[in-house]
Image: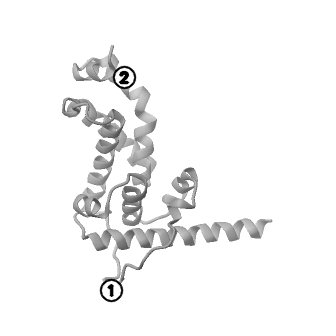
Amino acid sequence: MNLISGCKNNERSAQKELYDKYCSYILGICCRYLKQRDEAEDAMIQCFYKIYTKINSYTGDGSFEGWMRRVAVNECLMLLRKKKMLLVEIDSSFEVPYTEQGIEEILEYNELLTILDELPTGYRTVFNLYVIEGFKHREIAEQLGISINTSKSQLILAKKRLREILNKKKQAIRFRS
């Protein structure tokens, strides 16, 4: 039985199999965007509901995992917008400088995920969309209803904050040694 076609036919066994196979994948995405574990779990459940009810819109173009990831990201962004937690205030005089090698090229993926929770919601959201999901600033701006420069500045500020967090962690490790 094809899992996707089974879900398109509303077969409960296929839906359960899909959930069992992808729940940790979807939860991981939700946890990157939402700080509270219970919020991420609620978002994951809502994602699966949308996946089940919108699965007929999956045309087979691209990977099914990518389609589900898009559903999960959109659900998390919608929740953040609903809670008005998406954007943080930024200095309007902030200029976007030329960036050197980014922190995302330095960190290991798992290390990055553990410290993302320390970022403010707006920084974390733009960082996730740009670095992890691969969106362009134009796409982020459209998705979040912000300017391209706001997207760029929030990414730069997120990287700066990540560097500060990493430096503190390095100093703490040196101090213990």
Badge 1 is on which residue? 93
Q: Amino acid at mark 2?
A: Lys
Query: From this viewpoint, which residue is outermost toward the left?
Result: 57
Report how far apart the C-alphas of labels 1 and 2 lie in the structure: 51 Å
Location of residue 160 in the rendering, given as x and y in whole percent from the top left corner: 49, 73
Q: Is the residue marked by circle 2 packed among few (<14), some (14-19), or many (20+) residues within 10 Å?
A: few
Residue 44, image quadrant = top left
Circle 1 Cα neighbour tier, 10 Å, few/some/many (<14 / 14–19 / ≥20): few
| Amino acid at the residue labelled 1 | Ser
Give the residue number, with chain letter if any, for mark 2: 16
Left or right: 71 as drawn, with respect to 130: left
Residue for point 33% across, 21% down = 3
Given this view, does label 1 or label 2 mark the residue nearer the observer? Answer: 1
Residue 149 x/y as whole percent: 30, 73
Measured as percent of width and height from the top left, residue 68 is found at: 32, 38
Q: Is residue 34 above or below residue 120?
A: above
* Residue 36 horizontal/vertical position (percent): 44, 52
Q: Residue at x 57, y 58 (%)?
A: 107
The disc at residue 38 is none
Looking at the image, is mark 1 or mark 2 earlier in the sequence? 2
* Picture residue at 63% right of the left edge, 71% below the top: 168
Question: Do callouts 1 and 2 mark residues in contact (Cβ within 8 Å)?
Answer: no
